[in-house]
Amino acid sequence: MNRREFIKHSAAAVAATSVLATACKKTDTKPSLPLEGELEGASMTYRTNPNTGDQVSLLGFGMMRLPVEAGGTARENPDSPIDQEAVNEMVDYALEHGVNYFDTSPAYCQGLSEQSTGIALARHPRNSYFISTKLSNFSPDTWSRHESIAMFERSLNYLQTDYIDYLLLHGIGMSGGGKNAMETFNGRYMENGILDWLVEQKEKGRIRNLGFSYHGNVKDFDTLLQWHDEGKYHWDFVQIELNYLDWHYANEINPRNSDADYLYAELEKRGIPAVIMEPLLGGRLAKQPDPIVAKMHEKDHRYSPAAWAFRFAGSLKGVLSVLSGMTYLEHLKENIATYSPLIPLSEDEEQWILALAKDIYELKAIPCTACNYCMPCPYGLNIPGIFAHYNKCIAEGTMPTADDPENEFKRNRRAFLVGYDRSVPRLRQADHCIGCNHCVSHCPQRINIPAEMQRIDRFVDQLKQKL
């Protein structure tokens, strides 16, 4: 089945289940879950949404890295259809083991995530799960009132429902259309009256919780929360990037990002629930250099690097759910185990992992989360692939440096260059970057991608000259 046929198949599935979607009324929105603690036969940890009383699983299923039939994800094989049977299997397992929060977007999986999520979830009672999606009107072509409303209505259609439990304004703090972050926000949501329209939809019960996901500076974040304080707009929840590395070092890694400790504290003092994205920083915190892994095992050998990161994010009492973009069933099982139930970090463990974050930060890896928003590059570069290889060598402790003994330097130099050619085709490598800056405004991590490409290209050139 090609991509066009998959879209047709998805649309047909939506139509076939429209009776089920229409039958789901807003009075039947709260899943039948215990107030605290355990489901029968499971022990998932739940958090209470103070606005609605929803009992939300601490682990949220991020539907942004769904498997495709060719293997891997849509990012790796963009022309391959989503493996719907695999998605169904994971959704079934998640629900059976207490996961009830599913996060998607019109922008995920080459635009197919919502359809696939809707197909998988519609096979279960509507009151057994919460749907989170976004108004992802990033392109100026979608900023008009008509196009933005159409995007929201398509989300309902694709997700086979007549209401969204958790609706987010997507990627606030990012710039676009040649405008700065707040000018972009005004173009996407204010000048077209869409934010007020979304508030109206909430009053009608078509949206149960309204919030935003944030990638930006402190000033703009404070402005949005000031609106909340003044009663201009009420934010039911906010999605932020939070992990033990971003807790103190997000702003140092990139001055346009905000440290997670500040974002979380501002939400916590207002009683606004936080939904956490990037608890593993795009998988980076799950793949640590051997010396870091050794320290983790020495501290407590029962926990993998991923488990340490999930425990850190989940231990914060103001966190409603921690999202994980999972492609394989084994990842889902491991993450469920970490939160079934959560064993919160002790005070000693919290201080230890924040100290460890300093060691990781000083490795100076590029903070790419492989979100793929920078793609496609007009000049064909595989931007995430280049960063992934560079970071992989740092994580494995094989980055060639001038301080290495000669034999070790030669071995690491060869491994870096051979691995670079194998993982990224030569016509898609960093030396083909012309600095057009097309990618920069799309990066949630605010990475100066052209500058990093030039730096990596110089590094590669230096290694080749020493052959």
Image: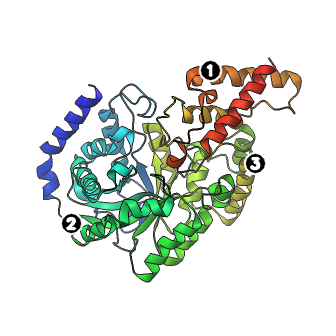
Please report whichever mark, 3 or 1, sits nearer to the chain's N-terminal start.
Answer: 3
Indicate whether 225 appears above or below 304.
Answer: below
Q: Which residue is mark 2?
A: 26
| Mark 3 neighbour density, 10 Å: few (under 14) some (14–19) many (20 or more) | few
* Residue displayed at 33% across by 51% down: 142
* Residue displayed at 52% across by 68% down: 221
Image position, residue 391 (x, y; %):
65, 37
Residue nearest the observer in this picture, 39 or 416: 416
Callout 1 amino acid: Asp
Circles 2, 3 touching at the beta carbon (< 8 Å)? no
Q: Which residue is mark 1?
A: 421
Indicate whether 335 appears above or below 82.
Answer: below
Callout 3 amino acid: Glu
Quadrant of the drawing holding the C terminus: top right
Please report whichever mark, 1 or 2, sits nearer to the chain's N-terminal start.
Answer: 2
Relative horizontal placement of residue 425, taking residue 29 as reference (left or right): right
Q: Secondary structure at mark 3?
A: loop
Q: Secondary structure at mark 1?
A: helix
Q: Which of pointers 2 and 3 indicates the residue nearer the eye?
A: 3
| Mark 2 neighbour density, 10 Å: few (under 14) some (14–19) many (20 or more) | some
